[in-house]
Amino acid sequence: MTERPSLVVGPDGMARCAWADGSDDYRAYHDAEWGVAVRGERALYERITLEAFQSGLAWITILRKRPAFRSAFADFDAEVVAAYGPADVERLMQDAAIVRNRRKIDAAITNAQAVLRLREAGGLDELVWSHVPATHQQPASFAEIPAQTPESIALAKALKKAGFAHVGPTTMYAAMQACGLVDDHVAGCFRGAR
């Protein structure tokens, strides 16, 4: 069986991680966002929420629904979402523009409440960024990219201890990749090792 290529060269002549070759949406996300440092409560809450909604789905689904998620979750203003009640949950369950999964919707509200409580202990930004690995090797191929790491396990545990839901170690490793805590652009990708 042939190993899947880790890099592709796009029509613009740039070498990219092969997963970015699937669509213009993937390519734009890869080139402008994935692996770029994300700071701030609202931005991190959004990314953690979207990664939780992505669990079990293709990322392209979430990427294409991101504007609807932003609208449905008050542009990820934790104070607003933390106050959502049963009527809001039902409204969101009827919103075909987002992923209608009650557990994930409930988790987004629970996590907004946890974000507010974290403000007294340094905030979400401090908690997330305290889990950057001391060392991280840029992967030579997809085969070298783990599904989870000791740091993502520790981050998941810290978030759960702070009251977060739907933040397992695999989901948190995806968030670490997306938020720039680790650089998993494969060797040779024009975005890697910046």
Image (cartoon, grey):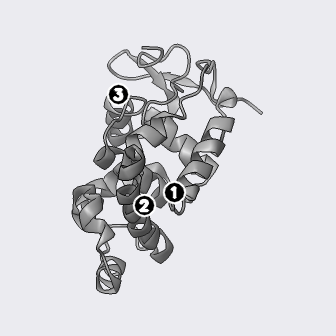
**x and y percent of residue 70 in the render?**
25, 58
Query: How many marks overall?
Result: 3
- Say if mark 1 contacts mark 2, CB within 8 Å: yes
The amino acid type, in three-letter code, at marker 1 is Ala
Query: Quadrant of the image for the N terminus?
Result: top right
First reached walking from the N terminus: tag 2 or tag 3: 3
Mark 2 or mark 1, which is nearer the start of the sequence? 2
Which disc number belongs to residue 185? none
Across and down, in percent, residue 52 comes to 49, 57
- Labels 3 and 1: the sequence-earlier one: 3
Q: Front-most of 40 and 92?
A: 40
| Real-space Cα separation, disc 1 to disc 2, in angstroms | 6 Å
The residue shown at (51%, 62%) is: 163
Q: Residue at x 53, y 29 (%)?
A: 132
Residue at 32% x, 46% y: name it: 41
Q: Residue at x 32, y 76 (%)?
A: 92
**Residue 138 lies in quadrant:** top right
Nearest the viewer among 154 and 122 is 122
- Whether residue 125 can be seen here: yes
Q: Which residue is mark 2?
A: 114
Q: Amino acid at mark 2?
A: Ala
x%, y% of residue 117?
39, 59
Q: Secondary structure at mark 2?
A: helix
The quadrant in which residue 134 appears is top right
Label 2, label 3: how many angstroms apart (C-alpha)? 31 Å
Name the secondary structure under disc 1.
loop
Of discs 3 and 1, which sits in the foreground? 1
Closer to the camera, 39 or 71? 39
> Badge 1 is on which residue?
162
Q: Return the residue at label 3.
A: 31
* Label 3: few (<14), some (14–19) or many (≥20) C-alpha neighbours in 10 Å: some
